[in-house]
């Protein structure tokens, strides 16, 4: 396998394109407009520069990696020759179903169609194509060039052959693939999101403050980052959306999002991306914000 198309050039898409290109694959990177693609190439260049200064790649590898990436705004031409398509567009069910319907008609019938979705059912995505056996989840972690895990998600119809191909391919990117079945939240978010939700409940019920909760988990459990800070990094809106997928998918009240999280998202406090979440990021300084006005 040599030719990979990546759909969506945002946070994840540019990291996925960077990683495949660094390992010698020909990558077509597709987004809806040139501005997004320009931003993505700048980000990739900057991140490759960081790898050069750390000595993990050479200047020649940086140049070769950039040469391996071609950008497209037209999906049909961008996926025409692909052996694998990795979709990393915005997390929205209708959008993903439309993209996979189109991919099924535009891509070579032999091509594997993968989604990097954090929470949408791979089985559901596969159901709008005529190649359910070739549809699979390839859930990279952020930042993609650094994080080792790839959660490889088998939909109901995904074949053994497709799964083996994607597992082997992930190893060629020097990643550690883990095979999981398609149920809400897969493994990563099914475990992570309830922990984050419980941390928010702990704050909501005044058991401890923001920094105290994060310190307990960092120093007591050796987590590199506390759960509230991690929620700010992921985006509180994203955390809420994934909790809703778990809650709806399992019909189990244990996944109900904490009302404090719901209130913070409704108020526009989405974490780093909005400048305020459990911490305040104004002026580049991270200060714990006591979300008391929202709690009971
Ligand atoms: N951000 C994370 O930490 C993270 C981690 C794992 C998985 N994911 C998943 O990865 C996917 C992408 O997330 P992200 O954080 O990179 O989002 P993002 O908003 O940074 O980027 C999404 C990109 O998709 C583009 N896009 C939208 N519609 C498109 C279309 N029809 N064709 C081509 N491009 C289109 C947008 O213009 C944007 O550039 C989502 O499914 C998300 O759940 C995100």
Image (cartoon, grey):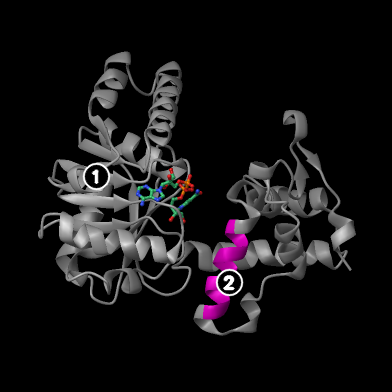
Residue at the spot 89% in from the left edge and 68% down from the top edge = 296
* Label 2 CB less than 8 angstroms from ligand 1: no
Q: Over which residues does the magenta segment extend?
A: 238-248
Q: Position of residue 39 (x, y in %)?
A: 44, 30
Q: Earlier in the sequence, mark 1 or mark 2?
A: 1
Horizontal arrangement in the rendering, residue 126 relative to residue 130 (left or right): right
Give the image location of residue 220, x and y in percent: 71, 53
Left or right side of 147 for 108: left
Tell me the residue that label 1 is attached to. 5
User: What secondary structure is the magenta-colored segment mainly?
Assistant: helix
Q: Residues within 10 Å of mark 1 (few under 14, many from 20)?
A: many
> Whole-percent x and y of residue 233?
62, 46
Number of marks present in the image shown: 2
Is residue 159 visible in the rendered image? The answer is: no
Examine the structure image and report whether residue 43 is included in the region drawn in magenta. no
| 292 w.r.t. 219: above or below | below
User: Residue at (32%, 14%) from the top-left corner?
Assistant: 59
Q: Callout 2: 10 Å neighbours few (<14), some, many (20+)?
A: some
- Whether 16 is drawn above or below 278: the answer is above
Question: Which residue is identified by label 2?
Answer: 244
- Looking at the rendered structure, the secondary structure element under dot 1 is strand
Label 2: state its secondary structure. helix
């Amino acid at each position: 396998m040599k030719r990979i198309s990546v759909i969506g050039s945002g946070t994840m898409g540019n990291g996925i394109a960077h990683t495949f290109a660094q390992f010698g694959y020909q990558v077509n990177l597709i987004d809806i407009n040139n501005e997004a693609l320009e931003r993505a190439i700048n980000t990739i260049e900057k991140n490759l520069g960081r790898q050069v200064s750390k000595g993990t790649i050479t200047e020649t590898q940086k140049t070769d990696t950039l040469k391996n990436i071609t950008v497209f705004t037209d999906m049909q031409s961008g996926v025409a020759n692909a052996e694998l398509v990795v979709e990393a567009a915005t997390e929205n069910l209708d959008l993903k179903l439309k993209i996979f319907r189109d991919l099924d008609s535009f891509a070579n019938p032999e091509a594997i169609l993968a989604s990097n979705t954090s929470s949408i059912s791979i089985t559901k995505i596969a159901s709008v194509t005529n190649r359910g056996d070739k549809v699979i989840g390839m859930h990279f972690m952020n930042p993609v060039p650094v994080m080792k895990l790839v959660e490889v998600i088998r939909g109901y119809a995904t074949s053994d052959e497709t799964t083996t191909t994607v597992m082997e391919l992930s190893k060629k990117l020097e990643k550690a693939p883990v095979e999981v079945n398609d149920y809400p939240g897969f493994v990563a978010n099914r475990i992570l999101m309830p922990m984050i939700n419980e941390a928010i409940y702990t704050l909501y019920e005044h058991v401890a403050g923001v920094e105290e909760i994060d310190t307990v988990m960092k120093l007591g459990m050796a987590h590199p980052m506390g759960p509230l800070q991690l929620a700010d990094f992921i985006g509180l809106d994203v955390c809420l959306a994934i909790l809703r997928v778990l809650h709806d998918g399992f019909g189990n009240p244990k996944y109900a999002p904490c009302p404090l999280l719901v209130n913070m998202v409704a108020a526009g406090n989405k974490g780093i991306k909005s400048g305020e979440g459990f911490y305040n990021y104004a002026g580049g300084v991270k200060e714990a914000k006591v979300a008391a006005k929202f709690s009971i």
